[in-house]
Amino acid sequence: MLLLLAAHAGVAAAIPWWQRRLGRAVWVVAALVPLAVVVWAGTRAAWVLDGGEYREALSWAPSLGLAVDLRLDALSLLMLWIVAGVGALVLLYCRYYVERDAGRQAALLLAFAGAMAGLVLADNLFVLYVFWELTTIASYLLIAGRGEAAEERRAARQALLVTAAGGLVMLLGFVVLGQAAGTYRISAIVADPPRGGTVSVAVVLILVGAFAKSAQMPLHGWLPAAMVAPTPVSAYLHAAAMVKAGVYLVARLAPALAEVEPWRPMVFAVGLTSLVLAAWRALRATDLKLLLAYGTISELGLLIALLGAGTRTAALAGAVMLLAHAAFKSALFLSVGIVDHQTGTRDIRELSGLWRRMPVLCAVAALAAASMAGLPPLVGYLGKEAYFEAFLHGTEIDGHSQLTVVLVIGSALTVAYAARFLQGAFGGRPGGAVSGAERPAAGFVAPVAVLSGAGLALGLGYAGTAAVVGAYADVYPPGEQGPYALSLWHGFTLVLGLSALSLALGAVVHLGRRSLPAARRLPDVQGAFDRAVAAVDRLALAVTGRTQAGSLPLYLTVLLVTVVVVPGTALAAAAPSLGSPQPWWSPAEPFLAVVVLTAAAAVVATRHRLTGILLAGAVGYGVAGVFVVRGAPDLALTQFLVETMTLVVVVLVLRRMPARFSPGRTMTRVRLVRAVAAGAVGALVTCFALAASAARPAPSVSAGYADRMAEAGADNIVNAILVDFRALDTLGEISVLLVAAVGVVSLVRVGGRGAGRAPDGEGGAGGGLFPTAHWDEPVQTWLPGAGERPGGERSVLLEVATRLLFPSILVLSLFLLFSGHYRPGGGFAGGLVAGQAFVLRYLVGGRADLGTAVRLPVGAIAGSGLLLAAAVGLFPLALGGAPLESAVVTLHPPVLGTVKFATSLFFDIGVYLLVVGVTLKLLSSVGVSLGDQARGPADDDRDAAGRAEREGGRP
């Protein structure tokens, strides 16, 4: 099972690359994965349907009870066949439907199929939630497409907000349920259901999440809005798979929670209300996809009521309808896609007589619609008879007679909109002309025919259908009436009469629908959602307008005061002991402390920007000196390198700013408040550090790290912590670093679009932070790209030094990388050193020389580093190990002798590449963009003169 899920992810990642080489055939390749799942599930069906199950588990954090638990039983087998079978047919259908962006859509559909497969196989509440949210994300991307249309973006946002919010509520319910049960394993909870008041709270929270995912009223508005998505997406996500997630959750937990209040009242009230009202709304829809969308909401309500009822017959009926709905609704959505593709419209008012142009499509669509209406001998009829039986004679269900009446009304409305669909899509309007359309290719119609034919086969082969769905229904006791058996003929019974009555009422409603009251008077959920979003936007603007005044000192003061008030109050209330700290351990420490304090005070006092930056750097270098004195060379090296890199980047930014700070206009009272806040924070942080050290409740974990260094094959404990013991933290930190770099680049690019040139004078080229000096152009070029710079901006001394030092600095960075496991260094320090080398090339040769030094895309360098680090973390899983687990490898290559290294070295290489890529990205954006903005007209004139001289002429 784990391998099948990994296959979905792996093939989905490769699909865009294959698409460029295979073209439309890539859809066939993508369909092979879900087809393999269907075959795999089929080979295990006999054992599972006989009451057996298959389990797989991957331990993640055993001490926390976290594991990827997967389980294949009767219900998950049924859902897996639906998800994979319909998914394969939809992917094959896309070969004819999708005309652009095929690689992206195929990858997303396959990734979604993998997420749904993981969801139905999950045997852990948290694992189920992870796959649940993965389907939400995939759905968002599929609905939004490339985000070019505002309508698609709005629909995707609505689907994301509603389903993700419901998922968070459901997660809270999972936590409550797991705590009450003492386990988060789903099979254990079902086998030994918890009881108590907290379980009722969990029931409400979990059902809210299920209702949101399955588009139940009043949380249904996102599903009709999502019909802007391509039809294959609607057929798969919004008919067969994603919307079934909530139904599946109800079916999975009903054996354990159906007797807990308010489970049954909630599933009956919400499910049957959705059944009737959504069906009524479908009768007035003129867009075929909207008609099917409201029909889907209606049928999902029926499924939730059946599978949540908690009786064997209702569960049997629900399982049959689960199969039936996946077959007929997917077939009908795909039929609409063909109609839309061939005619350019799906509006009932514009279609007429398509049954003549597309007789085969009309026939298979009619077969699917007949199953939806519950006509014999189709599988929909089996389900209809079963659910009438479940509620008519379901004495275990309170109010079963009244609920049966609601089911008859819902069934009649289903018949009516099924007839409306057929007449609107393929029938003829009085006096209307036949719609022009080309006959679809046989391969285009084939998936629709397979799905419609499946509905017929499951109906005629009701014995086999009963074996498939009965294995799940048998988790319930048979009830007072004995076990119900599926059949096309039970004799002349009241159930048969109800089926006939629903058909007759449906025909009457369809024929007389024009005289029925309009459904548009139903509550406008979409309008309510839009108004709620607009209200949140207005509130956000109002709050932002009042709190974001554009003053950085104000923001910082608020943060500092908050730190003083909130944690400070807690510290004062606890009044912990601060211990007996020793002032210093080395005579050098007081001197370094004086340097740091003096530099910090000077930063506040100076009015010159460059001086302030240099003094701030002195503070950082002083702290690095403290690390040296205290015997922490790794920390000192990193601090020195970070301070140096920070100085360079900040100076590049300051080129755009005036040389001096603006004259002080701040009132003395405000300055005093800021000074008091800063001093209080300093004192508070010191007290916190001392209190934490004095009140340590357990021995430090550092001793354990030192004892286990041999397992990591390391002599440098700092590097072993970063890339082995706490590698997950490091992976998160470098991810944040990359995200921050992307944010900086985006801000610089957006800010520079309309910035124009800086004015001459203060802050401009003429009187900015660095007054411009000009000298004669050097004759010889020492760096490949330096010749592109204006002669007045070149320095022979720096060019020669850079040419000599650049290779040596890179070699030093590699030395730090490869030796970091045994002595001070590592991937982060090595990456910073390499970054310094490229900074030097940029400062001397500018963008042209930086481009000659690095010919690879800088984004690819950073991304490959993160990808390599993540791959190193995941690779042990393939070998049965734990994530981020490392091993010590000893090789004996010729000539080199014995080579011993830890596999965490490759993780460190990923860190190295990411740091180098981030540095280059900052240089190529912050340095280049701000450098361009800081240039003035005089610089352009000098450049032109220099080019003319180099070409042998005079300006």
Image (tube, rainbow, N blue to C red):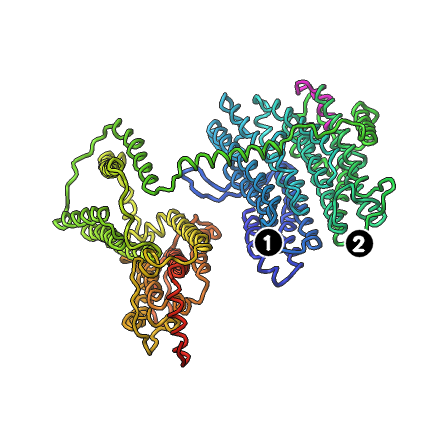
Front disc: 2 or 1: 2
Where is mark 1, residue-wise? 104
Q: How many marks?
A: 2
Amino acid under disc 2: Glu
Amino acid under disc 1: Arg
Within-10-Å neighbours for mark 2: few <14, some 14–19, many 20+:
few
Left or right of 369 on screen, residue 147: left
**Which of 912 and 221 lies nearest the eye of the viewer?**
221
> Which stretch did the figure color magenta?
387-401
Q: Return the mark for residue 438.
A: 2
**x and y percentages locating residue 778 in the rendered image:** 32, 76
Element at label 2: loop
CA gap, disc 2 and disc 1: 28 Å
Residue at 35% x, 56% y is: 656
Residue at 41% x, 69% y is: 852
Q: Are marks 2 and 1 in contact (CB under 8 Å)?
A: no
Element at label 1: helix
**Which of 906 and 769 lies nearest the eye of the viewer?**
769
Q: Earlier in the sequence, mark 2 or mark 1?
A: 1
Q: Residue furthest left?
A: 587
Q: Is residue 46 visible?
A: no
Q: Is residue 9 visible?
A: yes
